[in-house]
Amino acid sequence: MLLAVAATEIEMQPLLSMRPPDAGVSYLLSGVGPLETAVRLTSHLARLAELPAAVLNFGVAGAYLPPAPGDSMPEVLDVCLAEREVFGDFGIAFGDRVEPFAVPELGGVDDMTLDPELALRAGAILSHVGVRFHRGPFVTVAAASGTADRGRFLQQRHRALCENMEGAAVARVCREFGIPLVECRVISNLVEDRPGRPWHLQPACRKSAEIAGLLLDHLRDELP
């Protein structure tokens, strides 16, 4: 059994509409933000008689602007595959800058590498069908970045591709339960001074669902 996790109905519904009922895949709406995600996912997993073989976290994300002119970064509707997840605004906020706690004991777990074998499998699946994608770190935030300066800080500190509001919570819970996790997102917007340019939310949700369906079909057949 695989578990597909998305934050909202607008992200999940396109996947459900394009897939027939499947005994090998279950679905969970995590809600928006790391707190709601951690509570809902933990509660769901704790009720299961058997844990899933893997979790797929999918949805949309905001891409960070290139750190310098000419640098390659994701653009709107690009596909991104996570190597690791970071809690980007865990610590002390100084305007657009977030610094870690000075006392290490307060730090907790804020940087998590996702299952490398599962990430390689997902990348191979996408490459095999000709889907171009970016691979790298993702940042999870409790408050979405509303300025280009904050996005620039998070991108440079973590060398990240994009930000979302749930991925690190999913990664932390999966680590606690010992479940492999793969995370794939499609860019709906750029992290810039708001209001900024219009978001491409619906097309990004549709594309994210298509990618999620592709990964689920292949991983279901490959995983025990």
Image (cartoon, rainbow, N blue to C red):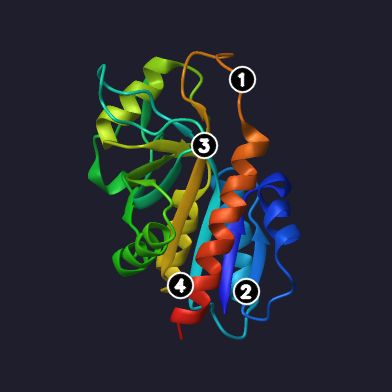
> Which marked residue is nearer to the observer: mark 3 or mark 1?
3
Note whether 25 is above or below 155 in the view shown. below
Q: Nearer the viewer, residue 211 or 118?
A: 211
Q: Please state the horizontal and vertical placement of residue 9, each as a whole percent of the image.
A: 73, 49
Which element is circle 2 on? strand
Amino acid at dot 3: Leu
Badge 4: few (under 14), some or many (20 or more) residues near its Cα, within 10 Å? Answer: few
Residue 77's mark?
3
Which label sits in the foreground, 4 or 1?
A: 1
Name the mark on residue 127.
none
Percent x, y for residue 201?
Answer: 64, 34
User: What residue is disc 2 on?
Assistant: 25
Quarter of the N terminus within the rendering: bottom right
Q: Earlier in the sequence, mark 4 or mark 1?
A: 4
User: Label 4 amino acid?
Assistant: Phe
Residue located at (66% from left, 62% from top):
28
Location of residue 177 in the rendering, given as x and y in whole percent from the top left corner: 45, 72
Q: CA distance from mark 4 to mark 1?
A: 39 Å
**Residue bearing the label numbered 4:** 177
Residue at 34 percent of width and 29 percent of height: 154
Q: Are marks 3 and 2 in contact (CB under 8 Å)?
A: no
> Would you name the residue on which mark 1 appears?
198
Q: Nearer the viewer, mark 3 or mark 2?
A: 3
For the residues labelled 4 and 2, the Cα–Cα distance comes to 18 Å
Closer to the chain start, of discs 3 and 2, is: 2
Crowding at mark 1 (Cα within 10 Å: few <14, some 14-19, many 20+): few
The nearer-to-camera label among 4 and 2 is 2
Label 3 and label 4: CA atoms lie apart by 32 Å
- Where is residue 2 shown, x and y percent of the image? 55, 74
User: Which secondary structure, mark 1?
Assistant: loop
The reply, left or right, for residue 36 in relation to residue 166 is right
